[in-house]
Image: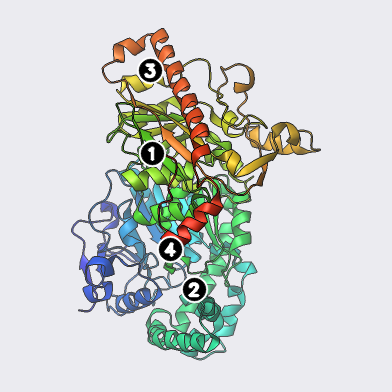
């Protein structure tokens, strides 16, 4: 069945924009991809769509005889299941103008946003200013319709310029810009000379130039090295490349309908105008902005441009993708929804609420988190023990409660080594998703810029970490979550030499009365093993003796949110700093979750400060007992060292569970 365009079940445009004129769209449409192209149902239908599907759907879309100016449409695979209060997302396409650039992301994004995609017909010659005004009217109408929600503008290359222009003209509207390889660097790119070159190339051969192939397929010319890298011989790689090229040629030829030479030349001239217009007005952009930059973009210097925009725009963060090309949105390994979540840019109200705005993990995100921790998981081979209500210690996590709310309170290992194995291990074994209360440092834009990789903490946000505040703790418990809490905080995770397994807890209780208010179960836990994988070479005291380190120390701790300001002594200064450690022949990580402590039914009792303090000290003592138990028992583990574990897995298989001591 050929692809068709059907009217939406309800108007997607505000009432003031429904009338057909030279500058307003026809009634909004839904684009329905045919079942055969989408793979029918089941697993095939869930497969990510990319370049081939984009070309086939775009060809059908632009061949429709309706013509006309730009208009909005909503893809049919952006159906039901949308979250309540979801903000509007307006997708602004690049040079192609079709509006199907998010074809591989529709179903995922449609659960998070009310999605509209801009379609600019091939024959349309509306100026850049005209397109900006058209998008601007929609943005203003959406801003009036839902004043308590942001409007998202997702633009790639030319579309990013449109988004920035709209933001510069409307600084008072709550906008969130997601800019994908923005065309603001046009004057530094190969595209600047491409339009002149295209005048010399007859149609249809303009599509076979290296620049156009890279633009259309995402580093098409790099396929040979990719194929050879998969272990094929040169002869096999050549044959595979030939097969791929043969299968791609029909799709490339189909692009004659989508990108005729005349249209490309017009769009490149528009991009030149757009880049100049926007660069002269960047100072007026006040919107939250996330720039996604491909390091292998062969058309635009996106890496350098992202850094320039970050330094120029007031509220801008960047995310770098080292292995992706210009058409990153069509590349299978990239997920836009995950990128937005990881950067902390998803919100449904005027301000981000890290609790209520959080979106549960997808299987792909859980797999990425597991892969992220795979090396540490492999070399540390964690042992997990838990305690049943009767006090019996068992291997595994059967001692954990099945339902929340619960507070897991424990020891913070050096640099938080235990976090990955702990959170993914519990989730993978029990289905319990632990939400961590994390240092505000992980959420601050200025601190992010100091890190070697600005996405360093993205996985923590994807896994559900929230800034540690009383309000966030309250909300997590109210929603019956399992909450991970470290009273020792940064002082414990960044301890000094000789302070392994020492608790740095405040004198006064911080969590007991809050936990009892919701009848939460408190689960003390201990973890050991940091001394089995590394030795500390330089701690904070050593670093402060190094010339000029104090400059970095001030950058790390100067303007950030201060924790424990009401504490005394060394607990008052929860400073963030580097730790230099040397690796050892890997030992093993050991976790034990102590006997659950119920607070349900004790609300009145624990309102009393003395009773709450007594329980607090009891929890601290239980954590210390857990650590002591593990330090003693690991001496009896014949597989504590990595060498016996490797031998065991060579015999029994890499996925075999390595034995340990008897609890």
Toward the viewer: 69 or 414? 414
**Mark 4: few/some/many CA within 10 Å (<14, 14-19, 20+):** some
Residue on which disc 2 sits: 218
Q: Are marks 2 and 3 in contact (CB under 8 Å)?
A: no
Q: Is residue 424 above or below residue 634?
A: below
Percent of width and height locating residue 109: 34, 56
Give the SS element for disc 1: strand
Residue on which disc 3 sits: 513
**Mark 1: few/some/many CA within 10 Å (<14, 14-19, 20+):** many
Measured Cα–Cα span from mark 2 to mark 4: 26 Å
Residue on which disc 4 sits: 131
Give the SS element for disc 2: loop
Left or right: 655 as drawn, with respect to 12: right
Q: In this orientation, does residue 368 appear?
A: yes
Give the SS element for disc 4: helix
Q: Is residue 508 above or below residue 412?
A: above
Front position among marks 2 and 1: 1
* N-terminal-most mark, 2 or 1: 2
Percent of width and height locating residue 277: 56, 60
* N-terminal-most mark, 3 or 4: 4
Toward the viewer: 175 or 518? 518
Residue on which disc 1 sits: 434
Furthest toward the left, the residue is 9
Measured Cα–Cα span from mark 3 to mark 4: 57 Å
* N-terminal-most mark, 1 or 4: 4
Q: Are marks 2 and 1 in contact (CB under 8 Å)?
A: no
Q: Are marks 3 and 4 in contact (CB under 8 Å)?
A: no
């Amino acid at each position: 069945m050929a692809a068709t365009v059907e009217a939406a079940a309800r108007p997607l445009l505000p009432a003031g924009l429904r009338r057909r004129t030279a500058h307003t769209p026809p009634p909004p449409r839904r684009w329905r991809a045919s079942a055969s192209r989408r793979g029918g149902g089941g697993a095939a239908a869930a497969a990510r769509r990319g370049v081939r599907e984009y070309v086939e759907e775009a060809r059908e879309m632009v061949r429709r005889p309706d013509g006309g100016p730009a208009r909005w449409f909503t893809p049919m695979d952006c159906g039901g299941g949308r979250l309540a209060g979801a903000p509007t997302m307006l997708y602004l396409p690049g040079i192609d103008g079709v509006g199907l650039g998010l074809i591989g992301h529709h179903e995922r994004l449609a659960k998070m946003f009310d999605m509209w995609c801009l379609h600019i017909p091939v024959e349309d010659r509306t100026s850049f200013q005209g397109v900006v005004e058209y998008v601007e009217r929609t943005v203003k109408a959406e801003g009036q319709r839902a004043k308590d929600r942001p409007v998202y503008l997702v633009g790639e290359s030319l579309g990013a310029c449109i988004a920035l222009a709209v933001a510069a003209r409307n600084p008072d509207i709550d906008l969130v810009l997601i800019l994908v390889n923005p065309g603001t660097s046009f004057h530094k790119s190969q595209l600047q000379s491409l339009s002149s070159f295209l005048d010399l190339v007859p149609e249809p051969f303009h599509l076979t130039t290296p620049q156009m192939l890279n633009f259309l397929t995402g580093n098409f010319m790099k396929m040979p090295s990719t194929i050879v890298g998969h272990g094929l011989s040169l002869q096999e790689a050549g044959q595979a490349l030939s097969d791929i090229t043969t299968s791609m040629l029909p799709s490339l030829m189909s692009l004659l309908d989508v990108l005729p030479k005349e249209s490309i030349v017009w769009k490149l001239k528009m991009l030149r105008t757009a880049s100049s217009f926007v660069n002269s007005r960047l100072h007026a952009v006040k919107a939250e902005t996330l720039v996604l930059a491909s390091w292998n973009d062969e058309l635009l210097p996106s890496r350098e441009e992202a850094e320039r925009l970050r330094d120029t725009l007031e509220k801008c963060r960047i995310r770098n993708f080292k292995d992706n090309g210009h058409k990153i949105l069509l590349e299978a390994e990239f997920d836009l929804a995950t990128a937005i979540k990881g950067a902390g840019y998803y919100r449904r109200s005027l301000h981000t609420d890290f609790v209520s705005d959080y979106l549960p993990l997808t299987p792909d995100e859980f797999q990425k988190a597991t892969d992220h921790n795979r090396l540490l998981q492999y070399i540390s081979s964690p042992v997990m023990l838990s305690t049943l209500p009767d006090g019996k210690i068992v291997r595994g996590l059967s001692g954990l409660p099945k339902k929340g709310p619960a507070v897991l309170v424990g020891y913070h290992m050096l640099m938080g080594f235990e976090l990955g194995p702990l959170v993914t291990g519990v989730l993978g074994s029990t289905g319990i998703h632990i939400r961590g209360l994390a240092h505000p440092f992980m959420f601050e834009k200025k601190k992010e810029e100091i890190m070697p990789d600005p996405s360093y903490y993205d996985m923590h946000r994807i896994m559900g970490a929230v800034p540690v505040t009383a309000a966030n703790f309250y909300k997590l418990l109210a929603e019956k979550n399992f909450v991970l809490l470290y009273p020792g905080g940064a002082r414990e995770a960044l301890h000094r030499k000789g302070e392994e397994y020492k608790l740095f807890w405040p004198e006064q209780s911080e969590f007991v009365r809050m936990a009892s208010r919701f009848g939460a179960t408190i689960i003390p836990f201990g973890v050991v093993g940091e001394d089995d994988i590394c030795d500390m070479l330089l701690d904070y005291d050593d670093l402060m003796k190094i010339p000029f380190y104090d400059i970095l120390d001030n950058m790390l701790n100067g303007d950030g949110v201060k924790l424990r300001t009401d504490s005394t002594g060394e607990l008052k200064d929860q400073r963030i700093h580097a730790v230099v450690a040397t690796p050892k022949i890997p030992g093993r990580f050991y976790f034990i979750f102590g006997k659950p402590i119920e607070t349900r039914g004790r609300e009145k009792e624990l309102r009393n400060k003395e009773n709450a303090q007594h329980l607090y000290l009891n929890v601290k003592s239980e954590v210390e007992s857990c650590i002591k138990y593990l330090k003693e028992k690991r001496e009896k583990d014949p597989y504590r060292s990595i060498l016996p574990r490797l031998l065991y897995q060579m015999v029994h298989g890499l996925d075999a569970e390595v034995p340990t001591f008897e609890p």
